[in-house]
Image (cartoon, rainbow, N blue to C red):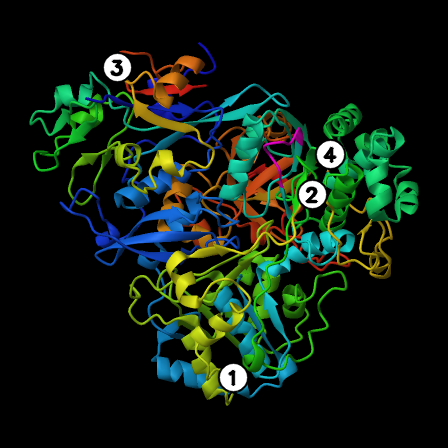
Amino acid sequence: MARYGMLINTKRCVGCFTCVTACQSQNGLEPEEDFVKYSFLEHGSYPNATVECVPHQCMHCADAPCAAVCPTKATFISDDGVVGVDTGRCIGCLYCVAACPYGARVVNEHTGVPEKCRYCTVSAYTNGDPMCTCVEACPTGARVFGDLDDPDCDLVKEIAETSAQPLLGDTTKTSIYYVR
Amino acid sequence: MSENAITRRGFLAGGTGVAAVAVTAGSLGLSGCSTPYSVSEHEDDEPTYRQASGLCTACPRLCAYTAYVKQDKVAKLIAAPGNPSTQGKLCARGYAFSKSAYATDRLTEPLRAKGDGTFEQVSWDTALKEVGSKLGGYDPDQLMVMHSAEPTAAFYGTRLANALGSGNSFGAEADYEPSRLGGIAQVMGADVTGWDVDVERCGALLILGTPAHGFGPAQLRRVIKAKNSGCQVVYAGPVRDGVGSHADWWLPVMPGSELGLLLALAHALIEGNLYDADFVGAHAEGFDEFRDAMADYTPQWAQATCGVDASDVERLAQVLAAARPACAIAAQGGFGQGMVASGETARMVCAVNTLLGVWDQPGGAQLYRKATPGDLGDLALDAPDAPTDRSPLAPAGMGGACATLLAGKVKAAVFVGCDPATEGGSYQKMKSAIDGLGLSVVIDWRMSETARLADYVLPACADLEFDGMPAFYDATSPAVAIGDRVIDPVATDARPVDQIVAGIAQTAGVVGAFDPSLDDFAAAELSGWSTSLDNLRAVGSVSGANSGYHSGEMPALKTGSGKVELVSDACADAGLTKAPHWTGEAIVSSGSLCALVSALPYQSNTNSAAAPGSAFLADKYLGGRALINPETARAFGIGDGERVTVSSESGSQDAVVSLAERVMPGVLVIPAGFDPTTASAGSEPRPVAAELVGDSLETGYGSPVNRAVKVTVQKAGA
């Protein structure tokens, strides 16, 4: 069984918003539903200043707080590490919104369900399906997707080579690693 | 705490002083879209898509893609792999704009102005009859058509003008391109419209500024690929973000002062004997005169005149020379667009690339070859005389729209898919000019600012709702692409441009010119290309044979001498000088700032800004903020997040500033793409660039100087 994860390299990210909008196209989202969000951090002072764009989304945590607090098990952690949302079970209590340390949830204004990144790119990764996921659409190759339990995959090698780290420490055991 | 740290508070309240991120979704007060296009891969057990070819018209790059449609709703988009504009990727504008068909505020019915600032709905029959009969009543030299870069608008707009006996047909995007393309053409010949860089083998890449439409997907990819291949990337421009934030070296340059940097760079290369004398000797004309003209442009001169550091110029010369010929100044930069000396800057870019001997060399610049439409043959119309408002240095068929409008030379105008009121320079001057017309007609998918001023507004199909004419791409491997009608018009009474124009022509009394169908015209344009119309519609984008590109061989150029021409008689005749001289204005004086109009990643003009997805991002990420260097802000007594009034000779705009260390002192970055209506639709005031820029046109080349303007800033209410 795979354990899916991702690497985001902010040294390649140019803050182009392609992943934000491509995700919306791929997943049929409304314009106001953004699963991918950006934080911009400026480093240094002029003239030695630059700006870092840090894209973030659901971290598909192995110890997901949203799953822990969900009263109906609408949020669940699947065997392959993808944190899923069973919209049929959701009662719209928004506990998951409060619990997520990464602000990943976006409330669907039509259904009331707090939705998030679905790791939809698994289909592109496993089947080669043509998709415009955040990973596939990124023009600069800032994102790598793969199986964290497969030592031969590009993701695992890149995490090792770059010493990529979770964004906010490891308390929730995220599956997204960052190069910064 | 490490400067890299993002705290939870940081997530919620925004990053350190930069574009604060509002985390709560769904609370932005946008009308947004209705659900029609919400399609999820997970909704069906067996999702079935049909595929069709799309052409993005958000910006003039016309990226080609395959649209996947399910239940008549546009879902995912896959960029055409070999298309020169995409190189296999799309951008944020493209994904957002693919859903412009579903915008709730798009035009739905033909409209006629009532004269009191409001419109009334009329039927298509009424609209076409009135527009056609009125238009037909004007003498040919009194009417004009201005069209977007979208090939159907371009073809049918031009044909309408010509069919009415008028040569006054103008491409809107071509209005600022005359400088860049004209400057390039003076040096390299009219067939060269740009170049790629052999990034995998390039040793040093210089990028100047930011293009008017931002960096397209292919360009973003190229720069990062260059870095990953070990190329040193130097970014010379006023703001270090986006692509520039990854440059190895940021060389701050005031907007419009790239010319000064290049003059001094040429001087340093020549005086230091760092240039490729063999290449120049073999492939260029006019070197002696050019060298003499560069004599006074020392690095010290550059420092005194345009603020560029003298030692930076020397170092840059060394870096490029050490790498040559595996180096280049990129074609996709901000040079040659909307500045007071844009055309001459373009000339110097080509001159410096020539000094470095990079053309068609391994690791250097790979010249575009022209993509030429097939001959229309019997379908062609006699072209009336070209308008005399085109500037002498503008390439054939380009420029003159703004000059014609502003001079009040025409009495009737049809605008097809373009928005000159906010894109053509000073909004107030354009408004006056359009108000002064006896007849103004807008054909567009949205109520642009130009449409608000028009007598008739005719609703056109949005992207993916119409079969289009082919688009041609100059490239190292020239290509052709096309957009299909993939969905029925969501606004059911919107019509394709070709039908609207044919309807107008008929009631204007034109006979025959629009009898052939769009398919007939498209097929004729594809003659000579290795694809039929049906095949192109199916596959979307086709590259021609790699026509003549051989690495290491310089092609014959379409100049008088067949070689690179470092000096130009035509430039001298047009009021400039044979060799480029410093004609810029370094807008650096105490008490004033240089306002730079800059594209955002999700909107580069009012057209792309109108996609609901783009408008959402502009609101959430405070894209309407004006960016200013903190030290400069202190000097003006302004703090982060404060409301200010920005004033120029043309007008004033309120804005909210964000402090940014990545902006060089003396510069105020104004976002592109807001018009008077959208500017006030956000949660805080957003400046309309068109209210600040002037109406001057560049000497010789004729492009509007609409991307940089001198401004003063003070706290609002002060």
Real-space Cα distance between discs 4 and 3? 49 Å
Residue B43 rendering spot, x and y as whole percentages? 16, 45
- The answer to whether mark 4 and mark 3 are in CB contact below 8 A is no
Q: Which residue is mark 3?
A: A173
**Chain for mark 3?**
A
Ranked by sequence position, the earlier of labels 4 and 1 is 4
Q: Residue at x 78, y 23 (%)?
A: B311
Q: Which residue is mark 1?
A: B513
Quarter of the rendering occupied by the C terminus of chain B:
top right
Left or right of residue B43, residue B574 in this image: right
Real-space Cα distance between discs 2 and 3? 51 Å
Where are the magenta residues, as a range? B197-204
The residue type indicated by label 4 comes to: Pro
Q: Which residue is mark 4?
A: B325
Quarter of the rendering occupied by the N terminus of chain B:
top left
The residue type indicated by label 2 comes to: Asp
Relative vertical location of residue B207 with respect to residue B529 in this rendering, above or below: above
Examine the image and state in which quarter residue B378 appears.
Answer: bottom right
